[in-house]
Amino acid sequence: MTAEPDGPEDRLRRFATIWSRAVYPVTSTSLTRPELEEQLLPLARRLRGALLERALDADTARAVGAALVDGHCTDPEALARTLDCVDAYLVLYCGEDGPQEELRTRSSRLQHAMAAGYAQALRERTLAEQEAIAQAALRAQGVVAQALHASEARFRAVFEGAAIGIGIADLDGNVLQVNGALLRMFGGSEQTLRGRRVQDLTHPEDAPQTWKLYDELVRGEREHYHTEKAFSRPDGTVLWTNLTVSLLRDADGEPQYSLALMEDTTERRLLNLRLRYEATHDALTGLPNRTLFFERLEKALGAGEGQRFGLCYLDLDGFKTINDSLGHAAGDRLLVEVADRLQSCATAPGEMVARLGGDEFVALTTGPDTRHEVDELAARIMNALIAPVRIDGRELTVRGSIGIVEGPAGERSAAEVLRSADITMYRAKSAGGNRFELADAEADARAITRHGLTTALPAALDRGEFFIEYQPLVHLGDGSVRGAEALVRWLHPQHGVLGPDRFIPLAEHTGLIVPLGRWVLEESVRQAGAWREHHGDTGPLRINVNLSPCQLTHPGLVQDTVDILERAGVAPEALCLEVTESALIGADDDLLKPLRRLAEMGVDIALDDFGTGYSNLANLRRLPVSVLKLDRSFTQGMQQFPADPVDLKIVEGIVSLAHSLDLAVTVEGVETGAQAEQLRILGCDTAQGWYYARPGPPDRLHDLALVDATG
């Protein structure tokens, strides 16, 4: 069966042909080039399968690399040419119609796995040959002494035919013999190596213990050692090797020669360096990425006593708008330009710039005195962003917010430092942006606490950590308890009892206010029903429940309220929902519709914090409210004697206006008897505050109502 012209098999055959032509000149095999192509074809098929698999199949790629060694492709140039061929043609001929960027990324990872498989197979083969060569060398040593030509011939065959470099030197370090593989690795003639001394083959990259190990070996103190070592080639390039040196002894056990076995790892090292660079640098801007930045930051934080660090955390202001309006390509060009400018700001020793992702960048400075250096670095960054960036004929203004953290090394972890910088950056952004702020421990602690409370909210509701306290509503005319306002509290396992001001804004931000508000309403109405069931008319007549602006827009508000009242057996007239004045400023008919439906059912609607917003008083006529709750700020002036006449006039005017519109008036924050009496004279209907009772459990509220009823 022939392959379909230009079909997958035909394209696979082309890839195998290109591959065989690339590696054939450097392959030690008796096969012809077409025969080698047939040998590579199944390997190419396995690579194609690994490329198209949904999950990366590194084992297949490693097996292909090992198969090259089995096929006598042991010259390092064969691996280099194979990787170049795979890099250039695998996706082209075997990628079919898949996503090109993803396929190229997978191809790179397959190349890495192939190189690893090749290296492992070559190493195993090398170790096997090393043992054979060592044994052959020992036998050859005896053969030389006994002049046995046959054994010498066998040793010579192993020595010259080995795929790895082999050299023999005497104990003074004079190189006596080298094989062809070693000469090819060094790229010189035999004369350039024979006669040289081992001690002359030093390199600046040598590990400190390299020559110590060699000295111990020639003194007979060790039998062998293994290390990674670099050598300088005659053409000036560097040869990296896995070097194993063994000691050869004579028949009496005395040290006689040193035997060096070398595996060329130059290409593999370069490949690893390239992969390391790609793993630690941002592909778009070329800056160090989050991984490399954390390595540098951890190193800076682990520096010795007297060392400090300074960190600038930059987030561009309004970058999302640019991305959305001009497209991601324009946004990418803007990021590249910003990265270039930031790079020019951090050129001193101990300074670096990195991109964490998106439009977030960091700049790090280290040294004994970073207090002033980090401020200067932040100022340079702000100045670098002043000039507009020209993209697609438009001049874009670039601004940024920077959070600065500076301090001594060794006191905080990298994660803590970055979190503090992030919090500080958002503080700069909240202050208007285009500025930098210094980290503040107290501000950090508040932000961390807010974050902790936010994340703990959902589980807290499930675990039943919320409870309700009730504050009585007292009729100013006769002093009787007419109702109670339900006030939710959170019994936090670490922070104790938290008031609503600590967690209600967080619940509104996360959307949890809807289920939390529903629970408060259900629990409060159930309590109102329990009061009436157990104590008849002596219980509070109605319950006031606060309604969040987020709950107003929830489509289930009316039905939830109806269901809760019916399940508890409580009449709608016993419920009053309090809505803040600010929530109804400029409210349209759609927002007011659920409140009107509830009011028509008999539920009272109270306008809470009245007088603190900017609503038009004429709007009161169209709002479905029956109660105005005056904010405590209006009654503070009545705590002194005589009372502030301006406050008296304002309250008197509001009460008169409310009563003319058939609205009842409730006053919050009553703390003294003088306040209560003055408010009664002014005509206010009900009041609440510490003068009467602090918020408390439902049983205490019933006792207050019972005492009032029995007088």
Image: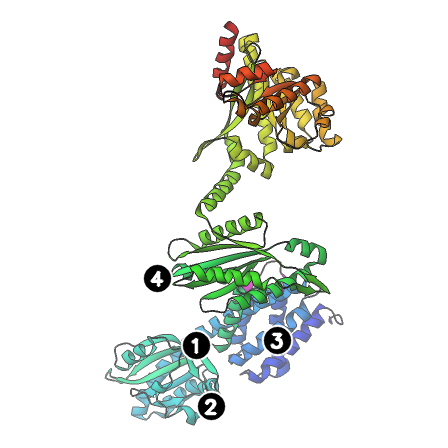
- For the question of whether residue 407 can be seen, the reply is yes
Magenta span of residues: 51-58
Three-letter code, disc 4: Gly
Query: What secondary structure is found at the residue carrying circle 2?
Result: loop
Contact, CB < 8 Å: mark 3 with mark 4? no
The numbered mark, 4 or 1, whose residue comes first in the sequence reads: 1
Q: How many marks?
A: 4
Q: Quadrant of the N terminus?
A: bottom right
The residue at which mark 1 appears reads as 126
At x 55%, y 50%, the residue is: 428
Instruction: Give the distance between the C-alpha atoms of the residues marked 3 and 2, in whole angstroms.
Output: 27 Å
Q: Is 155 positioned to the left or the right of 551 in the image? A: left
In this rendering, the label closer to the viewer, 1 or 3: 3
The label shown at residue 20 is none
Instruction: Give the distance between the C-alpha atoms of the residues marked 4 and 1, in whole angstroms.
Output: 44 Å
> Looking at this view, is 591 or 145 the one in front?
591
